[in-house]
Image (cartoon, grey):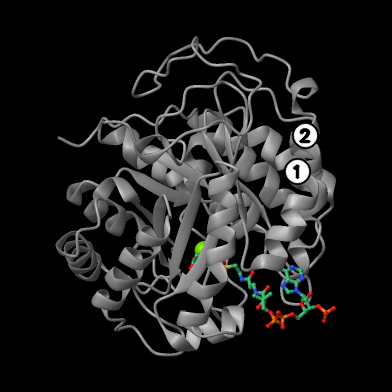
Amino acid sequence: AASDFVRIVEVGPRDGLQNEKQSIPVATKIELIERLAQTGLKTIEAGSFVSPKWVPQMANSLQILEHMLQKPPQAPHTINYQWLLPNAKGLENFLSAFQSHTSHEQDAYPTPPPSPGADEGPALNTSSQDPNAMPSARSGAEAMGKGRSSNGPETELSIFTAATEAFTQKNTNCSIAESLQRFKPIMDRAKELNLPVRAYISVALGCPYEGPDVDPHKVAELAVSLLEMGADEISVADTTGMGTAPKTAQLLKTLSTAGVENNDIALHFHDTYGQALVNTVVGLEHGIRTFDAAVGGLGGCPFSPGATGNVATEDLVHLFHSLGLKTGVDIERLAGIGEWISNELGKANESRAGKATLAQ
Ligand code: HMG
Ligand code: MG
């Protein structure tokens, strides 16, 4: 039977901010990550190493990585930080900071306080590993923050391709096949460094250029290829929010038939049409237990015109708790962060559950 613990991947600091027109100060981005680290969230996508010409807002991700390596937020549990990379150049930029840090990592991480152990889902063994170790060796089911047991921060990489040729061209200036070729050196290096790799498949439930009917078999074929290449998790993304309950069910069935296990799938919903929670329930019923979200419903993709933010993390947490599922996340703290960051960006808080929680 599927677990009653749901893992949430908070993508607010990357997906949530990448589309903002005004340059957001590094200090604000770091404060967002530090605040999120106090909510019980265990995986946070913190930035991306993409071309600054294409996505200027992410140009300061290197400074954020350097800060996170030198002064990671203190948290009572391991937090996995993810960094998005499109190609070898992005990897090179990431490694320029990561490797110089890990060569003298022993000095870097003070031992965090012991985990309170409350509402944690599957028990974490916090005693047997050196909390200062990063990266730590891990494999298979241990990957992607699913069963690791050290207490310090962990680093994970994300790569991304898409289910349609038109979107892949707009987003990364290459074909789907070329995007897979670009991942090979990233995957090889990640394996050497024991860094888990997540792979996104964009426009899995609708494409801004090719329309709402994306072939689920294409998504499944890509998922299988990415797993065979060594990806530890596939984040199946509804970039445009065109996903509906029947389409989501059909896609998950197709993935299962192709041999992709639920444990290897995360679902990444944007809420453009207001269907994200409905689609999430379809995912839960299918047995998926990892979902991406952004605090305050931040976000949008620069290469998907009109697409709005990710599903709000507060809304997901409220949904999961209402179903008796555990997340380990403190919704009141989270709601405060959604309100704070929305104010910082001068935009409306897009989380219904967040606003309602604050109004109580
Ligand atoms: P390109 O222009 O084809 O790259 O862009 P190129 O290889 O021809 O190189 C051109 C120049 O860019 C060179 O510099 C490179 O060094 C530089 P020059 O010699 O002219 O001075 N360059 C880079 N600089 C920094 N970082 C890099 C990098 N690569 C090359 N990594 C590229 C190709 C893939 C780089 C570009 O198209 C790109 O950065 N795309 C990223 C777009 C993006 O970030 N999209 C949003 C993230 S995906 C998303 O949001 C979807 C997701 O949330 C899931 C969902 O909801 O669907 C994940
Ligand atoms: Mg996205």
Query: What type is the residue that disc 2 sits on?
Result: Ser
Label number found at residue 207: none
Q: Nearer the viewer, residue 215 or 105?
A: 105
- Identify the residue position indicated by label 2 in the image: 103
What residue is shown at x 57% (from left), y 46% (from top)?
192
Which of 255 and 241 lies nearest the eye of the viewer? 255
Asked which secondary structure carries label 2, the reply is loop
Front residue (pair 106, 217): 106
Q: Where, by quadrant of the figure, is residue 136 drawn?
A: top right
Q: Is residue 181 above or below residue 65?
A: below
For label 1, count other residues whose C-alpha is less than 10 Å away and answer few (under 14), some (14-19) or many (20+).
few
- The residue where tag 1 is placed is 99
User: For the residue with label 2, is its CB less than 8 Å from the closest atom of ligand 1?
Assistant: no
Q: Position of residue 98 (x, y in %)?
A: 74, 44
Residue 101 pos. (x, y %): 79, 37
Say which element carries label 1: helix
